[in-house]
Amino acid sequence: MYGNDFGPPEEAPGGGLLGEVEAAEAALREAAARQRRGAPASDDDLAGYFAEVIEADQKIEPRDWMPEKYRKTLIRQIAQHAHSEIIGMQPEGNWISRAPSLKRKAILLAKVQDEAGHGLYLYAAAETLGVSRDELVDLLLNGRQKYSSIFNYPTLTWADVGAIGWLVDGAAIVNQVPLCRCSYGPYARAMIRICKEESFHQRQGYEILHSLSHGTPAQKAMAQDAVNRWWYPSLAMFGPPDGESTHSAQSMAWKIKRFSNDELRQRFVDMCVQQAEVLGLTIPDPDLRWNEERQAYDFTQPDYDELMRVISGDGPCNRQRMAHRRRAHAEGAWVREAAAAYAAKRAAEKKEKVAA
Amino acid sequence: MSDPSPLWEVFVRARRGLSHTHVGSLHAPDAELALRNARDLYTRRQEGVSIWVVPAGAITASSPDEKDAFFDPAADKVYRHPTFYEVPDGVAHL
């Protein structure tokens, strides 16, 4: 953990988001101990048994029977999540060679490596549903599966690295913490791992912004500019408003999803206001104000037409991100081939030795 | 040749005295690379002191299709549990 020289005390482990992750982990163990009949009685009972496991807040595991649509929904969601982690390395990777100090560079490298790791955990979770990682990578490369629209925005200054950590990773955590309680075991376990690591990401971003906003006027202006550009795209990360969200109802019933898009967006805004005050930066929303009646902040919704445009491929960096990923995949082919050839050679040598 | 980069299951011993626990899986062309990848992927934060990698295809698993029958033999052997036995009052160290 880097930089504990800021942040209110309730962010300490045990409280806040890390506390929620721990609570989800405890709930997982508790639910597993709950008494329930051990297996479906017959083939006619499969759906009933599946519903019982979900009802008891227990986990569906890879070899259990599950509705085909549950499997498909999970594959789509986990794959898009994995793709987002992989594409998400690009905006920040853009600044590794230009980080302002060796310390910042080492931290950013570690963070981008974590994103790759998160992508790999998630591809592995998706593979338990009977799809191969190669298939999923192909779906990404030929544009048939999407990644989070946020990564189609450019990182213009060093402060953007801070804003991504604070706002983008912050929004991702708010989205992901409930997924630690997802009904599908391998996904829930991957998310617990990921959320614990994301907490470092969010704090490193916050620390970058804190340093800048307490630096020279030019540095503070740079931090404010980054927050101005990343605020609304971060709000859009929670997806379309509840009325227009197509996948939500069924996913909620299956406990893949636990809260609606709008609930999570509200939670994020409510968290950010105080954090922005400590930074001394302004959230770029003139209509942001506390609503005593709702006990929550009123705020301006992001531009959902823009979100739809970016999702459909017309954001500032969509083409660049995909071109880069395709090139990296193609240029890495020789490494994969060399490793496979070496493994084959070694296996053949072993066989010969045994024969001799 | 079969899959050039097959799936491996990864088990990590978190600390001395604990057993290896399944932490996830990964792809690698051979055991040596699987071990190195497992180190990079699953122990970036000192999560372990020892790693096992096992080809996923080498694992034989019980199937939920077998329903209750597979685990039935254990159900009627309550005498395997210490709580089955009545200990007379006044007996110590038992």
Image: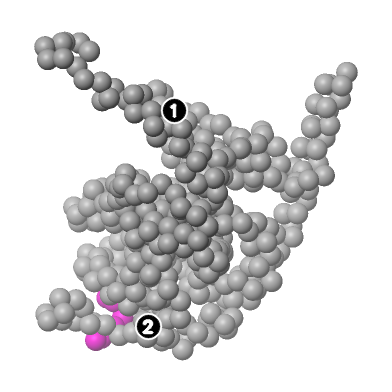
Q: Tell me, what colour scheme is on the image? A: one colour
Give the camera-side residue of A108 and A319. A319
Q: Tell me which residue sits at (38%, 28%) in the image.
A: B77
Per the rendered image, the range of residues in magenta is A280-287
* Residue visible at 88% across and 18% down in the picture: A356
Q: Secondary structure at mark 2?
A: loop
Which residue carries the number 2 mark?
A: A241
* Amino acid found under the numbered disc labelled 2: Pro
Does the stretch in magenta take in A286? yes
Q: Considering depth in this image, is A314 or A352 the residue closer to the camera?
A: A352
- For the residues labelled 1 and 2, the Cα–Cα distance comes to 47 Å
Disc 1 is placed on an element classified as: loop
Left or right, A287 with respect to A133, comes to left
Residue A263 in the image: state x and y as whole percent: 29, 74
**Is A149 located above or below residue A346 in the figure?**
below
Residue A52 sits in quarter: bottom left
Residue A132: x percent and y percent?
Answer: 65, 56
Tell me if I can see residue A219 in this picture. Answer: no
Is residue A339 visible in the rendered structure shown here?
yes
Disc 1 is attached to a residue of which chain? Answer: B
> Mark 2 belongs to which subunit?
A
Q: Position of residue A66 (x, y in %)?
A: 51, 61
Q: Residues within 10 Å of mark 1 (few under 14, many from 20)?
A: few
Which residue lies under the disc numbered 1? B19
